[in-house]
Amino acid sequence: MSETNQIYIDIFAIKEEKVVRMSLEDAVIMVVASQVNIDFELEAIKAQAIIARTQIVKSMKRYGGRGCSKNSNCDICDDGHCINIENKDNLKMMWKKEYEKNMEKITKAVKETEDLIMTINGRPITPRFHDTCGGSTENAENVISNKVIYLRRVLCDKCEESPNWEKNKEIRIEDLEAKLDVKFPKPSPFVKSDIKGFIENIERDEHGRIISVEIAGKKFKGTDIMDLLDLDSTRISFLPNVITFNTIGKGDGLGLCQFGSNKMAKEGYSSEEILKYYFTGVEIKKLEKPCIEKPLNGKIIVIDPGHGGENSGDYTGINGLRERDIVLKISKKLKKSLEKLGAVVELTRTHDEYISLKKRVEFANKIRPSFFMSIHMNAYSNPSIHGCEIYHFRSDIDGENLAKSIMSSLSQNTGILDRGIRIADLYLLREVYVSSIQIELEYITNPEKEIKFRDNKYIDSIVRAITNGILNYCK
């Protein structure tokens, strides 16, 4: 892999109990090694490489992911909690003399798809895959109770050669009872024991003796069954000791069918054609790489200028400065500042208008940004009170870290008093689906601070400080 402009990922190594840094492409190689059948066609392995890279990028904080939920300060861990990452020692034991040849094959597949990921609306998808679909893949809502536009059912007759196309598994009744926490009836000639299609229409007398029974559609007398099967009595009950379960395919059916993918590769389809068949409406595009001039490449940020409109309920300073006006001015300047660094920035409002909280939430959730920030001014009856407070929702660790980074930059670079990072059950913080903060920049009811916020140079210093706080957080 090229060393130029390389992307790195932070992985928590369980055995070493520390965070290690690995290039993204090297990580993709080890993930693909754990996911794919090494005997597959190269184009099928290339499709798996794009899936693996998309999975990893989806978790990376640099690209708006949440990182590992079990281990802080990393993107993923290597114990299978986030994603399976194979290690070289295990692969050498498994592949033996074929190790070098197999690694060369996987490396070639990863190299030929370098930086490619699957996206919807510019954001990496959550790519699902399974071994064998058995005739068709599945709609997301039937598996994960959530409709996903790119995980739609497609017909697939390509995986019939899979060793997992059809299998039978016998499970003993007592094992079923233990695993399912159920109880089957005890054998008794007085318990109805039809087995549809096998043993049906059982006629008994008042003592439980079989008068007649249909077995596989053929009618027998109870005495005939006793004689033909060499049973001791016509008081017969039926209860299977073992149930055979027949399955078609292997896996939950979501996303790419691996054996179907391999058959498509044999038929001449490219990796991108394979992926676009199994993932409805996706785009396959190059990952935005970090660069000195555009360190926020790949970041999508929604800025919410609080209030707006005549009945917005905003605060007003003693000299007439309106909260709704000053936060919009700051938000517009902040948008330009962040866009110069490569971020995509959206504002919930661009002029003085009323936007309901519900619509602000819907706007943000439709975009699914890297993070969301709402900007406000505070107020208090005592005009001497001043300083900045930043709020985040409980358990939003990334929101808390972003708040700390911005607060530190504001206090160091503008002299604003740090009044603390606080947890709040605010509607916006609770309902927006990504890490979110609400910045109460200053108390507009403090006359001295109100005057400062009329100075464009001071406003610019606020914008620079928030920008630096976001940059430090993203690093």
Image (tube, grey):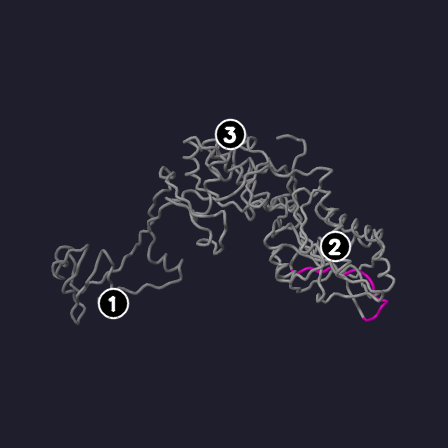
Of the residues under marks 2 and 3, which one precedes in the sequence? Answer: 3
Q: Which residue is mark 2?
A: 404
Q: Which residues are magenta?
A: 381-394
Three-letter code, disc 3: Lys
Residue tagged by mark 3?
Answer: 105
What amino acid type is highlighted by mark number 1?
Answer: Val
Mark 1 — residue?
Answer: 191
Vertical comparison of 27 with 310: above or below? above
Q: Residue at x 29, y 56 (%)?
A: 241
Q: Mark 3 falls on what kind of element?
A: helix
Q: Is residue 197 left or right of residue 79?
A: left
Q: Is 172 in the magenta?
A: no
Check the image and report above or below for 393 versus 45: below
- Check if mark 2's residue and mark 1's residue have beta carbons within 8 Å: no
Quarter the N terminus occupies: top right
> Residue 384, image x and y in percent?
86, 67
